[in-house]
Image (cartoon, grey):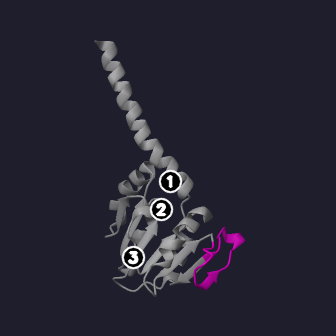
Amino acid sequence: MIKSQVLALSSLEVAILIAVTIPTLWALFSAPFVPTPMKVVRKMLKLAKIKEGEKIYDLGCGDGRLVHLASKEYKAEAIGFELSPLVFAIAKFLQPFWRSKAKIKFRNFHRQDISDANIIVCYLMPNTLEKMLKKFQTLKKGTRIISYAFKIPGLNLIHQEPRVREENMSPIWVYEI
């Protein structure tokens, strides 16, 4: 009897491990969690030229720092998508400390309807940006896309903030549909 309880518990542990590992690995290859320095987050938000009430999505929001600042400082309707269960748990743990109205959702951003966005921010790998290109191109006219570190070929570039090596800041690319 004890042996069967141990096996049942082990099966549950394996199921939990699989449930956590698969989305974490998917997120790692799609948008690995590399926290964007706060100085860069503030620069990205400034370049986005956010107006109060605009909807901003952060694709692969990590710990949620960008959406919280967008909500608190710009009064934006800010929503972040995070797929890694561990990173999502960290973001949800930190959320009350920000005291913002931002929402962080445990979702695969590839499958989300972002057509109502005014602004999209992302720090994604080039292969992921390439997969998102078709979705970006269907956004409404005037939507701004801010990409940290990696260029998005095929979009209308309106501004590029250069790399600043001494400040450990990669380029910031600003696009408009």
Q: How many marks?
A: 3
Which residue does the numbered mark 3 point to in the structure image?
115
**Mark 1 and mark 3: Cα distance apart in space:** 22 Å
Mark 2–mark 1 contact, CB under 8 Å? yes
Q: Amino acid at mark 2?
A: Gly
Tag 2, which secondary structure?
loop
Mark 1–mark 3 contact, CB under 8 Å? no
**Who is closer to the viewer here, 135 or 21?**
135
Q: Earlier in the sequence, mark 3 or mark 2?
A: 2
Tag 3, which secondary structure?
loop
Q: Amino acid at mark 1?
A: Ala
Q: Earlier in the sequence, mark 1 or mark 3?
A: 1
Judge depth for marks 3 and 2 and give the one in front.
Answer: 3
Which residue does the numbered mark 1 point to in the structure image?
27
Residue at 40%, 86% in the rendered image: 51
Judge depth for marks 1 and 3 and give the one in front.
Answer: 3
Label 1: few (<14), some or many (≥20) within 10 Å?
A: some
Vertical relation: 9 (above or below) 140: above
Q: Position of residue 12 (x, y in %)?
A: 35, 30
Tag 1, which secondary structure?
helix
Residue at 39%, 51% in the rendered image: 89
Region of the chain picked out in magenta, as a range: 151-172
Which residue does the numbered mark 2 point to in the structure image?
60
Vertical relation: 122 (above or below) 48: above
Q: Position of residue 96 (x, y in %)?
A: 32, 60
